[in-house]
Image (tube, rainbow, N blue to C red):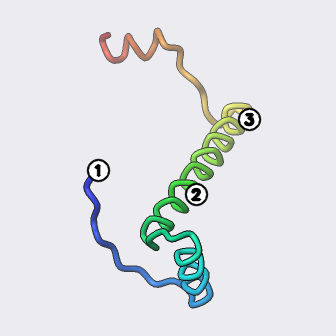
Amino acid sequence: MIAQKATFTLPQNTLIDLDSFSIELKKKKSHLIKEALDMYFDYLDMELAKNRLLDIESGKSQTQSLDDVKKELNV
């Protein structure tokens, strides 16, 4: 994975917490931010999956069978 630099603004209390955790855990702040974002993205994936399931159950969305997908893709 290629790392890229990013610049963003955080509230002061978040930066204070980040500094404290970084010192106590002896981990780089960038590592802590990456771990936090990874966990949050996992949470968001779950929320999206729940929303999609609700859409299917309510009839707003429909599913396709594997056979239909294969036919569409000529597989």
Q: Which residue is mark 3?
A: 58
State the image quarter where residue 71 is shown: top left
What whole-number distance in Å separates the C-alpha atoms at marks 1 and 2?
19 Å
**If the image is split into quadrants, where does the C terminus sit?**
top left
> Alpha-carbon neighbours of circle 1 within 10 Å: few (<14), some, or many (≥20)?
few
* Mark in front: 3 vs 1: 1
What x and y, as percent, mark residue 45? Answer: 57, 46
Q: Label 2 is placed on what type of residue?
A: Tyr
> Alpha-carbon neighbours of circle 2 within 10 Å: few (<14), some, or many (≥20)?
few
Q: Are marks 1 and 2 in contact (CB under 8 Å)?
A: no
User: Closer to the N terminus: mark 3 or mark 2?
Assistant: 2
| Disc 2, SS | helix
Residue at (60, 27) in percent of width and height: 62
| Disc 1, SS | loop
* Mark in front: 3 vs 2: 2
Q: Which mark is residue 40?
A: 2
Residue at (54, 78) in percent of width and height: 23
